[in-house]
Amino acid sequence: MLIVDDEPNIVLSLEFLMKKAGYSVATAADGEDALEQIKHAIPDLVLLDINIPKGNGYEVCQAIRANPDCKEVRVVMLTAKGRDIEREKGLAVGADDYITKPFSTQEVVDLVHRLLRPDA
């Protein structure tokens, strides 16, 4: 799993939660770093903030979807923007789901479980 957010507190809390839930976690603070990491190790899932430097979340999601090696990667967009238009744009560029900040940590863990373990 790759967590992409430029807010260290969010990265730390999500990283802790996901590791506690049994997932292997990598992190990136910007779009460029995220895409570079994905080149070297394709994650099962990306928790992707929309408002990040060096390529916003929409651009990163589009790049993931354009890569044939990443067709199985699940993308969940995280954003402080809760308006329907942002949600629709995120889903239109290929996100599997969308979570609005502030979010319940349990909500994120449950969503990750549903996307990565649909039969569980």
Image (spheres, rainbow, N blue to C red):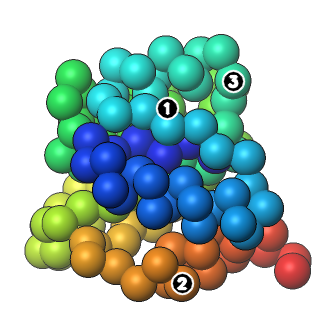
Q: Residues within 10 Å of mark 2 (few under 14, many from 20)?
A: few
In the rendered image, the vertical position of residue 114 relative to residue 69, given as above or below: below
Left/right of residue 88 with respect to residue 64 in the rendered view: left
Q: Nearer the viewer, residue 19 or 103?
A: 19
Left/right of residue 39 with respect to residue 65 in the rendered view: right
| Quadrant in the picture for residue 87 | bottom left
N-term-proximal mark, 1 vs 3: 3
Return the residue at label 2. 106
Badges 1 and 2: C-beta atoms under 8 Å apart?
no
Task: Look at the image and tell me whether residue 95 can be seen.
Answer: no
Return the residue at label 1. 64
C-alpha distance separating marks 3 and 2: 26 Å
Q: Residues within 10 Å of mark 3 (few under 14, many from 20)?
A: few
Q: Residue at x 78, y 74 (%)?
A: 118
In the rendered image, the vertical position of residue 84 relative to residue 43, given as above or below: below
Q: Return the x and y of residue 20 as percentages of the image width and height.
A: 70, 66
Q: Residue 41 got which mark?
A: 3
